[in-house]
Amino acid sequence: MDKFVFRPKLFLDLATYDKKKLVADVMAGIIVGIVALPLAIAFGIASGVTPEKGIITAVIAGLAISLFGGSRVQIGGPTGAFIVIIYGIIQQYGETGLLIATILAGVFLIFLGVFHLGTIIKYIPYPIVVGFTSGIAVTIFTTQIKDLFGLTIDNVPADFIEKWIVYIRHFGTIDIWSALVGILSVLIIAVTPKFSRKIPGSLVAIVVMTVVVYLLKQYAGITSVETIGDRFSINAELPGMNVPDISWETIKALVSPAITIAVLGAIESLLSATVADGVIGDHHDSNQELVGQGIANILSPLFGGIPATGAIARTMTNINNGGCTPVSGIVHAIVLLLIFLLLMPLAQFIPMACLAGVLVIVSYNMSGWRTFVELMKNPKSDVAVLLITFVLTVIFDLTIAIEFGLVVACLLFIKRVMEVTEVNILKDEIIPTDSEGDEIVQEEHLVIPEGVEVYEINGPYFFGIANRFEEVVLQTKDRPKVRIIRMRKVPFIDSTGIHNLTCLCEISHKEGIHVILSGVNPKVHEVLKKSGFYELLGKKHICDNIHDALEASRHYLAKLS
């Protein structure tokens, strides 16, 4: 494995930085900072923390991701995907538990990057990604019903089904003004892009609805619409660094949610960076990106923030407005910091119903329902993984969904590999049609000597197929004098395969059957050599091609006679 080199994109870009790029980055950063403001507030509140913690996360984590990440245009901060996880961790372990879990997740992300596992994250099956993303979207939507319609509910249950039961029972308590504010917010956000692509609909909705609700309170006496100030006390001061007391018992308790945060953060950030690459024609460094994400998730909670990752919507806004280097992400963080310090007290007038409308649109965009419908037309195994992950995410939680989804996907993958891996027994002749080892096997009939059987394995020789191969060989009624195991189409072998192959050779030797391997590729050859397999079989009985293997079998038979 190559040694990891700490090389953020920012450091590379500064070598060729000029005034033209600076102007473009500053303009893009200002716009992205404004776009990120309402989302940071909404994500903070929906996650179960105060609104300022959402902005602090966008500032600290957004700055760290731009400084140390592996993408030129990635914008980081709090995202909708983490809402469900964060809320659940706070409910079970409190805010201190969330802080520790986020720091642990940051450490895991750094390890993933340092050990070059960034590319592996990309291979998580697409149905799992769509399943839990759609599930999160449904869950986010469900959490916003109370504020969207202004329902009077003292305590909203955490369980998905129980939530809807309570909503239905209390729907008679709907506040018409809150409902109007929420619905109008959704309409404004949906319609704004038709008039302006640069001004975010969420910002327009918040400004308009905040003014409307303020006027209704002042001049019409309508005070039923709850605002942020009614629920939270706004503090526009940067908190000091707070390092929690971390014990081994706490770490053990929080490893599972920390892994969930790390895996989800890795998937979302690398997905965002990959999408950005396709737009700008660049190639991000996935391992460096994970290290940057890890640093961000260690720093963010130390200043009171929550988990963060790369955000596709804000990253695309950055690109569409001319951002071309990580400097735009740094500007975006500075803009948010200035807004936080100078204008944060005004956030107390923002209606909760309006923020609920913002998150309804976020959940709709996140749902990817068109992709979900398309995947339902795929093979049944993919549909099963999709639906299982989706249902578990909605009904239980994301940790269980990811773990179970990955297990099911792995089992289905093993099943598919086993289905395409063939074991053939040849007794009379062979008709080779392609190359094997270092030589080209000519188109000719190869006669198998009497007393020799050839077993050809076509596919990986791992734990899924090794047992099946052993059963096929041992269930054969004939007892040949020589067994040739042809492995020209075996790309790799694992420890179970080596164990089974060793057992087969030992049993064969006890029965007086000579074993020869044929067409072993260099990688498998090296694995067998390191495992000590040569001592059992002998290097001369591991042949480069079938010609040599058949010739070796003839020599052995001649000795016996």
Image: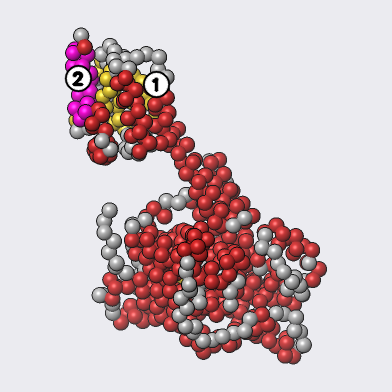
Work out which quarter of the rendered image holds the C terminus and state it.
top left
Locate residue 82, reporting x and y percent.
54, 65
Locate residue 114, reporting x and y percent.
33, 61
Locate residue 480, reporting x and y percent.
32, 15
Name the amino acid type tagged 1: Leu
Which residues make up the magenta segment?
538-559
Task: From the image, state whether disc 2 or disc 1 is nearer to you.
Answer: 1
- Whether 331 is among the magenta residues is no
Local packing at callout 1 (Cα closer than 10 Å; few below 14, some 14-19, many 20+) is few
Local packing at callout 2 (Cα closer than 10 Å; few below 14, some 14-19, many 20+) is some
Locate residue 554, reporting x and y percent.
21, 16
Is disc 1 placed on a helix, strand or loop?
helix
Q: Which residue does the image show at 40% across and 78% down from the upper left?
A: 330
Secondary structure, magenta segment, majority class: helix
Tell me the residue that label 1 is attached to. Answer: 474
**397 in relation to 53, above or below:** above
Extreme-top residue of the structure: 561
Tell me the residue that label 2 is attached to. Answer: 551
Q: Which residue does the image show at 29% across and 21% down from the upper left?
A: 509
Extreme-right residue of the structure: 172
Q: Nearer the viewer, residue 403 or 409?
A: 403
- Whether 539 is among the magenta residues is yes
Residue 417 horizontal side relative to residue 16, left or right? right
